[in-house]
Amino acid sequence: MNTANTANISLRRDIQVLRGISVLLVVLYHADTGLFDKGYLGVDVFFVISGFLITKIILQGLDRGDFSFVAFYLRRAKRLLPALYSTLLFTALLAGSMLSPADLYNFKEQLFGSLTFSANMVLPLQTAYFDREVESKPLLHIWSLSLEEQYYLVLPIFLFLIPVFLRFAALIIVLLSSLTLCLIWVDSSGPAPLLWRLDPHVPVNEWAFYVLPTRAWELLTGSACAFFILRHGAVRLPIAVSWSALLAILATAMAGFDHPHPRGDAMIVVMATSLLMIGNDTWLPEVSFVRTLEHIGNWSYSLYLVHWPLLAYAYFAFLGDIDPAVKLLLVLLSVLLAYLQYRYVEVPFRYRWRVKSKQVWVRLSIATAALAALPFVTFGHSDTEYAQGNRITEMRARNFGLSIDCDNSFEGDVLKSNCISGDSPWLAVWGDSFAMHFAPGVSASNIDFVQLTQSACAPIARTALVFGRYNEAWAKNCLLHNETAIDFVASNESITHVLLGSPFIYHFGDRKQNKLFVDGRIQEKDDRVSYKYFVETITRLKEAGKTPILITPPPADGHDIGMCMERGELGLIKFRSNCDIDQFRHQAWYKDTLDVLARIADEQAIKLIRLEDLMCEDGTCRTQWKDIFLYRDKGHLSIKGSAVLFQELGLGKMLKELNEAPAATGAD
C-alpha cells in the first residue's frame, strides 16, 4: 500500500483524511485491538485512491503531450523506494537477533520479494494472509505495495497504447474482467490455473487475495473515477451522501457483511470510496480531529511500512501472547516512527534530491544490491541448520499423522491406504489437525486404527466453519468429508471406537472472525448450532453401534509453545524464563470448550479424556519430556511428542483399556 505522487495535483483534504482513516484501520486490525474486525479493508480503500491519483497523473501528461515514461518511473522510485529501503534496512538488521534459522530462511525470500516488487507472489507460498502464522512474517504487508507497483508498471503502457477514444471503454472491460475473475477465484478452493505450478497446495482463493489480475478491479475503479473527474469535473455531492459513504466504509471495516475477501465487503468499500473520489472536499469540517487525520494521511505510507515489522517482532519477543497495553504502545510508536520517516526520509528524497536521473538509478541500484546482500553478511546465525535439519526442525515439522495424504483422508468415498494402520482397525481417529497429531502416538502404541482427518474440519456433521482461506467451497467439502467418515465408520464392523479430536475452540468460544456454513448458507457463528450438530453426530455414531470418545485439546495458554522451545534452544527468549504452561491459564483459555465437552460427555454418557490430567501437575503443564519437545506450535503435538503422550504418559494404555471394557462410560 502506498500513496501516489501528487506533486502536480492540488491535494484534496478528504483524500488525505481518508488515507489517515484507512491506514489506522489496517494498523488497529493488525494490532488485534478488536475495534475493527475487518480493518484490512483499509487496503482496499488505498487501492482506489492510488488508482485514482496515479491515473490522473498519467492522463494529464498524455493530454498535454508531455508524458515521459522515464520521468514517471523516476518519480515513482523517488517517492516509494527511500522510505521502503529505510524500513527494510532496520527490519533486516533486527532480523538477525530476533528470528530463528527457519524464520530467517523465509525472511530472505520476503526481502527478495520486497526488493523486486514480487512479494505478493512470494508470500502465498509461505502463508495465507488470514492464517495464524502471519505474525512470523515481518514483511507480510509488502504484498500490497508490490501489487500496486505492478499496476503502476502496466497502467502507463496500457493507456499509452490504447487510442484515446477507446481508453475508457478498454479500462471498463479490463475492470469487469478482473472483477469476474476475482469473484470466481475467491469462492473456489481448488488449484489456481498456472499458479499451481508454484505450489499445488496454495488454493485458488488464496491467490485471489494476493495477485494483480484479481485485485486490479479495485485500482481500476479508482482509475475510472479519474477519467470521470478529468472529463466532467468533481460532482457536488450532498454532505449527507459523503458522510454516508464514509460511514459505510467504517461500518464494513467494523463488522462486515460478507465473508470471503475480496468480495462483498470489498465491493462496498470500493464503491463508497469511489463516491468520495468523484466528489470534492467541502464536506469536511474545519476541526482539530479532522486536521489530525489529515496529518496521519500525510504519514500513511510510512505508517503502513513501519507498523507491521514492530508487531511481528513483538510477536516473537512475547511468543505470540502480546499484552494489550504493549500493542497500544506499539501503535503509538508506529505513528511516531512514521512521522520521523516521513519528515527525514520521504520528504527530502522526494522533493530535495537534486541529482541527475542516471545518478538516481545508479544509487538506487546500489542500495538494492546492498539490501539484498545484507542478510547473508549480518545475520547472527545461519539458516544452514534449517536447510539440513536438526532437532528443532524435527520438532517444528507438520504432524500429518500417518501420512501427508491424510490431510484429506478420502479419495471420493474410499479411504486412502496410507491412512490405515493394522490389519483389523478397531479405532477411528476422526477430526481436524488436532486429530492428526494423535496418530503417531496411536501408531506407536500398536493400536490398529484408521485416520479420518482433514485440516480445520472438526468432527461435527452438517456444519463447518468459514474463516480465512476456508471459504464456502471448502466448507462444502468439509461437510462431504464428515458424512463420508460417518458412513465409513458405520459400515466397518471392526471399528468399535471413535476418537473425536479437535480444539473445538473455533466452534465453542469467542472466535469472532468465524462463521458457520449450515443448511447451504453462511451464517453468524452460533455455539448452540454447533452444539446441536455435535450431539447429533455423536448420536449417529452410537446408533451405528460405535463408542464415541471425546478428548480435550492439549493444554495451551495463548503463547506459542513450539516457538518458545525453538527460541529457547537458540537463546532468543526475551520475556519468559521457561516454556511451561500455566494450568489455570490453560483452563481459562479453553474454558468454553472444556465446559461444552464435559456437558456433552455427561449428557451422552460417553468417555471424556482430559489431557491436562496426564500432562499437568501442581498447576504446571509440561511441554517437554526429558529431551523431547512435546509441542510443535501453540497447541499441536510434535510427532515425537505424540508418541510420548501415548507411551510415557499413558494415553495409549487408557485407549486399550476402553477397548477391552467398552461399557465404561461417563465423563471423568
Image (cartoon, grey):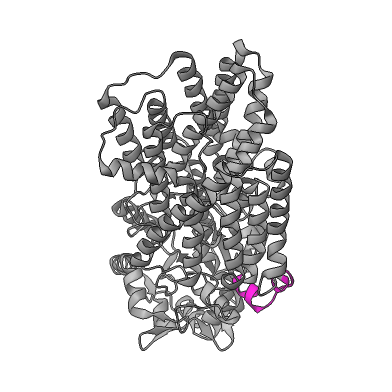
Residue at 38% in and 30% down: 272
- Asked if residue 402 shows in the view, the reply is no
Picture quadrant of residue 87: bottom right
Q: Residue 588's spot in the image, x, y percent? A: 31, 71
Viewer-nearest residue: 117 or 559: 117
Q: Residue 371's spot in the image, x, y percent? A: 68, 58
Residue 365 vs 186, above or below: the answer is: below
Stretch in magenta: 384-396
Q: Residue 112's spot in the image, x, y percent? A: 68, 54
Specify whether residue 386 is painted magenta.
yes
Judge from the rendering whether residue 607 lies leftward or rightward of residue 392; answer left or right.
Answer: left
Residue 149 vs 430, above or below: the answer is: above
Judge from the rendering whether residue 20 lies leftward or rightward of residue 72; answer left or right.
Answer: left
Viewer-nearest residue: 119 or 238: 238
Specify whether residue 243 is painted magenta.
no
Viewer-nearest residue: 26 or 495: 26
Q: Residue 638's spot in the image, x, y percent? A: 57, 73
- Asked if residue 65 shows in the view, the reply is yes
Judge from the rendering whether residue 175 lies leftward or rightward of residue 611; answer left or right.
Answer: right
How many discs mark residues in the rendered view?
0
Residue at 46% in and 41% down: 260
Work out which quarter of the rendered image holds the C terminus and state it. Answer: bottom left
Residue at 42% in and 52% down: 27
Magenta: main secondary structure equals helix
